[in-house]
Image: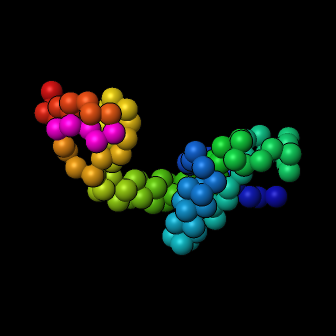
Amino acid sequence: MNTPAPVCVYKSGSIQEAHLVCDLLQTAGIEARIASDGVENVVGEVPFQIAGSPIWVPSDQEQKARAVLAEHRANRNLKPPPLFCYHCGVDLEDRIATCPGCGGELDWSED
Ligand SMILES: [Zn+2]
């Protein structure tokens, strides 16, 4: 056996995100795979949804994988963060002065 030890390069909160990131890495030619925590001990016993979804790549592909992930994060950050009322949490379309959900006053000025 001369397979490089796998390295965890990413840990996503959801299986959907894990698949997305895994596809991204595989498209870049990296042998990425998704595994639950402690997969050596509990194969088939812990659902991914509960254990979290770390993504593993062979250690000799780690640097390339991290570059792909950095680019993925940069692309995602281009989207503006979602707006929401900080009194009641309702989603807002725009920076409005009064929340339509709770009627609270909203101050959008930067500190
Ligand atoms: Zn509100």
Q: Decide: is 18 above or below 96.
A: below
Residue 69 in the figure: left or right of residue 47: left
Say which residue appears at 27% left-offset and 52% top-offset.
Answer: 93
Q: For this rendering, which residue is in front, 28 or 60? A: 28
Magenta segment includes 72: no
Q: For this rendering, which residue is in front, 74 or 92? A: 92
Say which residue appears at 22% left-offset and 49% top-offset.
Answer: 94
Q: Is residue 5 visible?
A: no
Say which residue appears at 64% left-offset and 65% top-offset.
Answer: 31
The answer to which quarter of the image holds residue 100 is top left
Q: Position of residue 73 (x, y in %)?
A: 40, 53
Locate the N terminus and report the quarter of the image it occupies. bottom right
Residue 73 in the figure: left or right of residue 30: left
Q: For this rendering, which residue is in front, 25 or 53? A: 53
The answer to which quarter of the image holds residue 108 is top left
Q: Position of residue 7 (x, y in %)?
A: 63, 48
Q: Which residues are magenta?
A: 97-101
Q: Position of residue 23 (x, y in %)?
A: 57, 67
Q: Decide: is 38 above or below 44.
A: above
Q: Decide: is 58 above or below 101.
A: below
Q: Position of residue 47 (x, y in %)?
A: 77, 47
Locate the C terminus and report the quarter of the image it occupies. top left
Q: For this rendering, which residue is in front, 53 or 97? A: 97
Could you tell me what secondary structure mostly forms the magenta stretch? loop
